Amino acid sequence: MKAQERSYSLNRGVGSLSKEEHGLFFDAVQRLGLSNDVKLAAVALYLDFKSRPIGEYNADHKNLEIFLIASVSIAAKVLGDVRTDNEFESKMFVRRERLADAEERIIKSFGVQNSIVPFADIVSQLTRRQMESMAEVFAERELVSSNERDELIKRCYDYLDAAVEKGLAPKMGYRGRAAGVMLKAVGDLGLHISEIDIARAAGFDKRSMATNRDLIDALLKDLKSSET
């Protein structure tokens, strides 16, 4: 399948949204200052999600707002407009845990049908964007310098690629991947960033972090032992 054929189909635009949906999208775009490309991609993603079986979660509009916001979050990351979870919390008044849950429901719908972007591809893209976003948060909080931030991102990329080569499956959520890889990279670089800071930046609790850390560690330890 050609790359352009895997991109978002943007012909299902804002005209397909209800008045309420359009209002919510417009508010999100204005508050976050997002580009028109992100807006169109988010609309296409949201409409595709609603058309799938998992979209029944949104059938009575109880969860309309959170799925719209999650669509915007995913589209921004996929298109390279890195936004931190802090921005969505403060500007869209949404809890990080609810945002993470809605994103996972949308992403898992790609396992039902790969008509927009292959499941493994989108998980990989989102993991990289999440790691960049987390490193940026650490720099903003002055937990790392700009040089350390750049080195941290590079190390995370290397570890992620290695883990995928060793069998890390896309069914592991992108935030879980990012958290596990980030924890490993932070430890190996000797940076003073706590596990709680990493968990919060990834939108995870500490208990979930332990599972992701153990899985990533097992894959990367196996890689090291095979190279020695």
Image (spheres, helix red, strand yellow):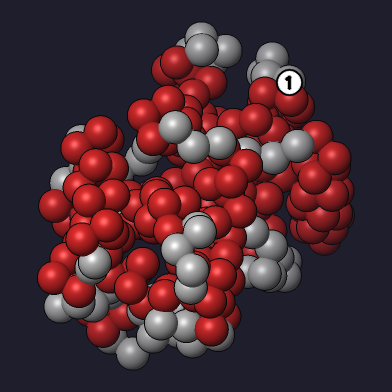
Q: Secondary structure at mark 1?
A: loop
Q: Image quadrant of residue 199?
A: top right
Left or right relative to 130: residue 28: left
The residue identified by callout 1 is: 194
Q: Image quadrant of residue 188?
A: top right
Between 222 and 138, the residue placed more toward the observer is 138
**Where residue 18 sits: x, y (%)?**
24, 66
- Above or below, 175 relative to 93: below
- Above or below, 56 relative to 198: below
- Above or below, 60 relative to 188: below
**Where residue 43 sits: x, y (%)?**
27, 64
Q: Residue at x 74, y 25 (%)?
A: 196
The answer to whether residue 218 shows anywhere in this view is yes
Q: Image quadrant of residue 46?
A: bottom left
- Above or below, 73 relative to 4: above
Q: Residue at x 51, y 9 (%)?
A: 142
Q: Residues within 10 Å of mark 1 (few under 14, many from 20)?
A: few
Left or right relative to 125: residue 8: left
Q: Residue at x 56, y 36 (%)?
A: 95
Left or right relative to 60: residue 192: right
Q: Residue at x 53, y 52 (%)?
A: 127
Between 142 and 85, the residue placed more toward the observer is 85
**Where residue 50 sits: x, y (%)?**
42, 75
Question: Which amino acid type is shown beneath numbered disc 1?
Answer: Ser
Between 124 and 31, the residue placed more toward the observer is 31
**Where residue 123 sits: x, y (%)?**
52, 63
Kindly give the residue lying farthest to the front in the view shown. Answer: 60
